[in-house]
Image (tube, grey):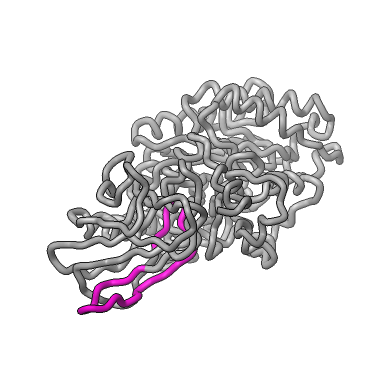
Amino acid sequence: MDKLVKKLINIVPHERQIKWQETEFYAFIHYGVNQFTDREWGTGEEEPAIFNPQALDTDQWCEAMVSAGMKGVIITAKHHDGFCLWDTAYTKHSVMYSPYQQDIVAQLAYSCAKFDLKLGIYLSPWDRHDERYGQGKAYDDYFCNQLTELLTNYGAVFSVWFDGACGEGPNGKVQVYDWQRYYALVRKLQPEAVISVCGPDVRWCGNEAGHCRVSEWSIVAASMMDNEAIKENSQQDDSAIFRERIPSDNEDLGSREVLKNVESYVWYPAEVNTSIRPGWFYHANEDNKVRSLAELSSIYLQSVGGNATFLLNIPPHPDGYFAAPDVQRLKEIGQWIQESFSVNLLAEAIYTASSCEEGHEAGALGCKNNYWKAKDDDSEVAVIAETKKAITPRYLVIQEEIKKSQRIEAFILSYRNGGDWEQIAEGTVVGYKRICPISEKVTATKWKLEIPSGRGGATLKTFELY
């Protein structure tokens, strides 16, 4: 085993990152004054009086999310316009000074508990309304006071979501964000929450179009943690070009070739975020532009099935409910997930392996807290699954034991055809989860998963066919 591999396999996730990745598919809720002005970005000059939903129903939101198979939700408690959706003591630019006069974050927290969904918080550091913005410590104090309210009054929070948007405030000044102070406060108040995007736990996939890398590594250069925070030095562009931007020069973030000259590494997994509509906030003229089931299922396979998570935005109607087209699509994606991944065809299979570390034989696959592990070298290894009856799968689902790092660099699935093994699917990295569609319809009782390339002794927590 070479020196680089020894270093890389010592990089493992924190428990909070594992729990976040197990959430897999969850919702983003962009809601605020923009619903009433038909804008994507507010100016900060909006009056709270315009915010007046007539039928706000967070139970309806959660019911629709559960129907989609989602396990959590992140709400924009404050977007760039500075309007606050909770009962804050630090500004009158809030829902409490609107005709609605109710704490929406509290309502959502109650509904999340009722529907067994995790709650996450988005708090924009950029504030186009508050005069303290651009005033250094005065604004940081304000921001931290509000962050404290959100992280102490609404129960457990699984994700604190920061973005790097940074521009002028109402006084024409730009704030230099004290990220380390924000992070320390989150760690103190919600130590189990991941800090996402402009944070040390979860990174942005690099675009808002739902594009995913072919090989998504969780182990990357430590300098990646600075990439999003650096954006505070430049004004973001609110345009389709920015939302669809797909960097072409960083498709490979974690191969040995890329990391061989890097001094330090971190476990920094990716989140794929996009909206169910063209915009992030609700616009009536987009009711007929809700993403199709084909689009959403494709993004799901590439994100959840590509060692990332899927954060899907659903913007409520101005009156406070999910519109019918969005609800229908969420139900459809949930049905598709259930139909595709509810019956593991290898549930009763017998597993054997060509190489295994003592105590981690392939026969343990599928048992809770057990995993197969190859011996600690770079030799090619394989696991074979045999069923009593012939099966015809559509998807391969495999998972590494990421507590032992991310090791698999390539895999091949074959089936026994008479006396020969015939290759049917292949892929690159695995990590937390890899879903590989099987395009050719074949039927067999013996299936072989080969790992021709890996870092040290590969691990396998799950080898399933659906």
Image quadrant for the C terminus? bottom left
Magenta-drawn stretch contains 461: no
Q: Where is residue 434 in the image (x, y as percent from the top left)?
A: 42, 58
Along the line of sight, the residue nearer the viewer: 148 or 51 = 148
Answer above or below: position of 334 versus 32. below
Classified by dominant secondary structure, the portion drawn in magenta counts as strand
Stretch in magenta: 413-435
Along the line of sight, the residue nearer the viewer: 348 or 8 = 8
**Which quadrant holds residue 162?**
top right
Tell me what residue is drawn at x 81 percent, y 47 percent. Answer: 233
Tell me what residue is drawn at x 55 percent, y 50 percent. Answer: 218
Q: How many marks?
A: 0
Q: Position of residue 145 (x, y in %)?
A: 67, 22
Along the line of sight, the residue nearer the viewer: 339 or 149 = 339
Q: Where is residue 290 in the image (x, y as percent from the top left)?
A: 47, 62
Tell me what residue is drawn at x 77 percent, y 28 percent. Answer: 139
**Which quadrant holds residue 247?**
bottom right
